[in-house]
Structure formats: C-alpha cells, structure tokens
Image (spheres, rainbow, N blue to C red):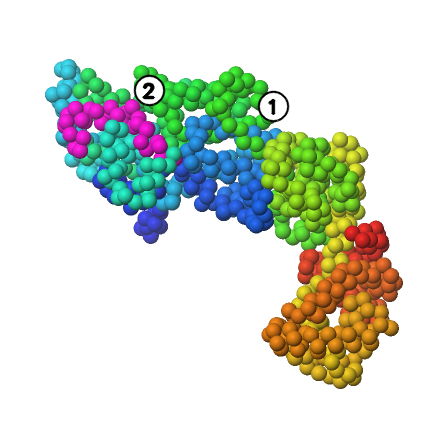
Amino acid sequence: MRDLTKAMENLKRHESGWQQQAMLSFAEFLQEVIAQPTRIIRNVYQVYADMISAFVSAGEDEYSDDPESINYLSYNCNKLFVEDSDHPFFADRLFANRLIRHVEALSVGAQQNKIYIFEGPHGSGKSTFLNNLLRKFEEYANTPEGKRYEVVWRLKRDDLVGGVHSLSSLTEKLAWVLEQQDKKEKTLEEKDECRDQTGLADYFEVPCPSHDHPLLIIPKDVRRQFFDDLFENDNFKWRLYTEKKYDWIFEESSCTICTSIFQNLLKKYQDPLKVMEFVFARPYSVDRRLGQGVSVFNPGDEPLRQNIIHNEVIQRSLDHLFCSSRPASYLYSRYAKTNNGIYALMDIKSHNTERLMELHNIISDGVHKVEDIEERVNSLFFALMNPEDRKVLSDLQAFSDRIEYINIPYVLDLKTEVEIYREIFGRHINESFLPRVLHNFARVIIATRLRTKSDAMLEWISKPEKYELYCDNHLQLLKMEIFTGYIPPWLDEEDVAAFTAKRRLNIIAESEKDGWKGLSGRDSIKMFNEFYAIYARDDKLIDMSMLGKYFRKYCKDDRDILPQGFLDSLQRMYDYTVLQEVKESLYYYNEEQISRDIQNYMFAVNFEVGTTEACQFTNEKIEISEAFFQRIESRLLVDQKDAPAFRNNVQKAYTTNALTQEMLRDSLAITETSLYTHLYEKYVHNLKEKVLEPFLKNENFRRAVKDYNEEAFKTYDKKIQDDVDFLMHNLHKKHGYSRQGAKEICIYVIDNNLARAFAGR
Ligand SMILES: [Zn+2]
C-alpha cells in the first residue's frame, strides 16, 4: 500500500478562510471596534461603497483648471470589471460616472432600501456587468479590508435557564432527560469532536440568520450612551454622531430571533451584562453559491416551495433552554440570508417579475411576516432590465420612488469602444491600422447609436455648418469627443468660452437618451472581426478608404443606420487632423531649437562671414557662413536683397540695447531681451505660415516623399533629404506613425492635395 502521509500533508496547507478564525467574545469584539471603528462599523451600503473605491481609482480630470468643469471624470474601472475576469465588462466614461454617482449617494446614506434597476438594451453587457460586480463584492467582503462581523449566540446547556424545571409537561421532561443521557454517551464516544455542529457539547451555537451586526444587540435605549463611553472624544466619534451614513447603528434593532433570545436570557439573569457573555461575533462570510450575503436569481429559477427556513436542531435546543411561555422561534425567510448583503435579479422576466413585485412590497413596508414573526429586510437590491420589460412594472408606478433606474446603454465613448476591440482581438490590431483609423471605426459604430438630433448641442452651437470641415452637421462627432472628455482644438474661441458648466451638464444629461439603438456590443465585435479579416494585411496598413468602402456597402443594405453624410464628414475630420499632424511635424516645433537658432543668430551677426565661433549663449560651435544666415533669415521672412540691412539692424540693436542695457545693466538673460522676443515671435509666426510650402510648391519635395525608403531617395539634394527625414521622424515620434505609415500618410496628403483644401486653416 502506498503511503499517503505526504500527499495528505498538503491539505494542512489549505487556507480555509474564516472557519479557522476564532470566534470573538463580545468584549474581544469591542476591542476590535475600538481599534478599527470605520472598518467594523459598516453596513452593506458602506462596504459596497468601500469596495468600489478600493477597485476604482480616483477620477481624473484632463482639464483640472477649467473653471467650468463639471466633474465628468475619467475613472479606471479595470480592476473592478476587467482584470482576472473571464468575461470582462467595459464601462465607458458616461456609465462609470453614473455608477460612481450612484455609489456616492449610497455611501452617504441618502437613499437606502431602494431597488436599483440597471436598464439597458440587448447586448449592452448588463449581466456581465452585474456578475463581475457581485464577484468582486464577494471577493472583497471576504478579505480583511471588507470584513464585517455578525452575531452568534453561544448558549450554555449546563447553565440552562430553567433547565428541566422549565419544561411543562411530563413527556417533555422525559424527552429532555433521555436526550441528556444520550448526549453523555455520545460525548464519551466522540470526545470533543463535532461538539458545536451537533449541539452535543456543553454549549450550542445559534447564528443570527439575518447576519445582524453585533452592536445591534445592545438595547437601543442605552446605545447612544454606550458608544459615548466606548469611544474617546475623537474624530471618529464626532463622525459617528453626525454623519447620516451612521444613522443605522443608532436606529436599527436586532432581528426578532436575537431579540427574543436576549429577552429570554435577561429574564433568567436579570442582568444585561451577563446576557452579553453569550453574544459572540464571527466574520460575515459571503458566498454567492450558498446564497449567503449574495443571492442572484435568474428568471427561470423556480420559486421555492418552502420559503420559510427552520433548523430543527437549533429549535429543539432553544425550546429546551427557554420556557415555553416565551418561545424563541428559529424561523426565517430566505431574505434573511442576504440581509446586510446583496439580493439581485437577473432580468425582470417570468419568475423574476414575481420576485420583484414581492420585493417591492417588502421594501415599501420595511418588514414582512414569516409566519407570526416580523422580519426586517435591509439589503442592497439590484435588478437588470431590458427596456421592453418596463411594461411589467406599470403596477409599480405608484411606488416608483422605491425604484431607481441606472442606465447602462451601449458604449458611447470611443476610447472604451476601441479598448474592447483591443481586449478581444489583441493589442497587435493597432499595428494593422494607420493611426486614427481604428478610432474612426469606433466613431462609425457609435454614430449608429446616437440620436441624430441633439438639442443640447444645438443650444450651444446653433450653426453647425461653420464646422463643416471638421464635423458633421448634427455635431455627432463633436459630441463623441465631449463624451470621451476631450475639447477639440478646432472649436472657435467663442464656442469654447460658451461651453459653460450648464451646457456641459445638459449634454451629459442628454447622453442618457443615446445608446439605446444601433449596433450592439455584440454586433460591433462581429463587424470588426469581419472588417479586420478583409483588410488587415502585412504590406498595407488599413486606411480611411477601406473604412469608407466597408461602411458604405453596409449602409446600402441598411439606409437608416447612419445619418446622411456622416461618413463624408468623418473623412473631412480625418483629413483635417492628419494635415495638422503633418504640419506640426514639418514645423520645427521644438521651442528649444528655435531658441537656440535665435541666440546663435544674435551672436553671429557680430562676426564676419567665413569665421567659426563658439556661441557664448548656447556653447554651440557656429560656422558663420552665408548659408547659416540665410537658413535663419528665410524663416524670419527676410528677402535676400534686404538681408545685409536686416543683419546690420539686428547687430545695432544687439550692441546698443540688448547687450549693454538689458543684459549688462539690468542683468537680464539674453532670452529676456526685447530683441530676442521680437525675433522669436517673428520666427514662430512665419514658420507656421510657411510650413506647408514644400507640399504646395516644391515638386522635388513631393517626389522625395514618395521615394522615401527607396534607393532613389539618395539622389535628392541634401537639404530635401534632411527635411523629409525630419518630417518622417516627427510623424513617428509625435503621432505614432510607423515608418511605412508616415510615408503613406504624406502621400495621402499630397495625392489629395489637402494642403490646398485646408489652406489658411
Ligand atoms: Zn439576529
């Protein structure tokens, strides 16, 4: 026979979690309360809120110094919904803000005992959202950070209240005596094992089926004073007595079962302190599969035949213990199992409709009857709903203040939409696209989900035509930018100024009506898959023409899917944007380089052409040649025939004013002198104006771009090679183009003559 010792040893290393944790006496529990009051004194709403803030990082505001900011923040919900999840859920920025507002309202204790219905169209990921949320809640509630305690009564048999004398009839007495004998024999056989579970030990345990917080055992009339003496006069105590979220600890009572046990014991001992010796605290362990702390019902789950739960063993022990005139009935409903926890309904259909109705009645009354006993229900109630199922709720209209809807429509934030493709198809998909094209795919998908007309947008920008070069005339493209938290640079100054907090709130509020139609999350993944399969190739990046072709074909089959002209507008916005990128990459945007050029020039005008000097300001060694002067003068827009006079003037201004007065007398740096400032501004201004000239006028430059990366490129003169290299390098570094992509985009700009199309913009 094989020796199993070693294999079995492994079991010792199994971490069994809470079971191993010692049960705390009430006194020990109070020490915990004093040590960590904010952690131990929490109801389910507070733990839920703490869980969210543990997994969602603080929101970020990209325009933090914008006085009109409305706190529409970027929250990273990945830890909550994506990481370690087999089925990730992607919260877009709009939904994340909605979720955080809901949690904030809950955590301050403003709105409790409500049913939160997450409503969204088919394929919006509602059930994935709820499953992930509950999974994280379960995970968090079972960690030290999310731990709470619940009441367990540990009642002594030998110290029975009444004992055999309290039993009224002879048969009861006889049964009791027999059981005592039976118990003694078994105890001898089994020694200490199984004592608590079988109730054969000196004591037996009665867990509170409603998961009562142990502090609720303290009678309400003395609770205030109790806490006053328990805590020092510190910040926590002040919060406990003033913050609404702590109201429950003063106002709630323990459940009927705990109350009757307490009263029975009190009757026996006439001493509340003695009674508290029977109160123990153990961690509230949350287990969705057992329905403890979290219960989820699917529409198809049959209603239970037995909705009332007993425990014969505990009941018998209690009956023996307490006199029958005041029985403690160990009876509870299944709502008790999620008391102080989460009760969730997946979809309001079939049996879940009945459950919702019942739940609603319970919440409205606050209590319900379990046989003769009143049971309080205090849980976090969630439900999911499709819009077409709203009709079943018409009966509930009268009580609608008990129901709060949180919309969970299709993704409307293009960053999130793109993130979904990356997550599902892999990050490498980026490499198949020219920059921006992937995001434009997402823009088309989102456009199908938006309502065409937006009053909030038109109230802000009444004449959308003025942006026809960058945006569609329903301003959907602009709205999408705002949903992602971005204010595009092509907006007029006056429109940016008119983008007030009130208008922002209106636009965000209006988003609640978007995302209920169009392509669902599932549809968009299917389409992306198809699109990618057709166009992704090794030798050619996916560009806008492919995107246009694909969606135009799609629109032929479904004419109403996109507003007319949307794809053209998207193309124009793209053209404008890539032109800006090319412009910026051509332009010697590097401020430091401009600054060095100007300083070198101011220094060099003091020397003869043909000499080499080290500039005393930049320490650069300068070959002072005609070419050196011309390079800078051309950017200062100085005509060659005026150059000598210009150089002369700069030299004079330098010696008489900049050097002698500002620098030597007033100790200014060269970059603070008025001559420097003047030259700098002129340089930058002209650079921006003239930057597209090679694209407009210089045929050689255009051909060199097309020959870039080819053998023929080396035949161009050095200046053109340098400029093209510089352009490509900047496109790569600043705008994320690959070598091939940078070339493709330049050819695109040339072939479509974008420089002329957007001249002066
Ligand atoms: Zn209880």
Residue numbers of the magenta segment: 245-274
When the figure is inspected, residue 281 is found, relative to residue 367, above or below; the finding is below
Instruction: Return the x and y of residue 262 as percentages of the image width and height.
Output: 22, 27
Labels 2 and 1 touching (C-beta < 8 A):
no
Q: Residue 74 in magenta?
A: no
**What is the secondary structure assignment of the residue under circle 2?**
strand
**Residue 374, numbered label:** 2
Residue 719 visible to an observer of this rendering: yes
Residue pictured at 13% horizontal, 23% vertical: 162
Q: Quadrant of residue 141?
A: top left
Q: Is residue 178 left or right of residue 443?
A: left
Q: Position of residue 361 (x, y in %)?
A: 44, 19
Q: Nearer the viewer, residue 370 or 616?
A: 616
Q: In the image shown, does 436 or 498 lie closer to the viewer?
A: 498
Identify the residue at horizontal 35%, vertical 32% (top origin): 247
Q: Secondary structure at mark 1?
A: helix
Of the residues shown, which amino acid type is indicated by label 1? Glu
Q: Position of residue 420 (x, y in %)?
A: 62, 44
Q: What's the distance in space between the residues labelled 2 and 1, CA to CA?
A: 36 Å
Q: Main secondary structure of the magenta part?
A: helix
The mark found on residue 388 in the picture is 1
x, y percentage for residue 358? 45, 19
Answer whether residue 748 is visible to the viewer in this image: no
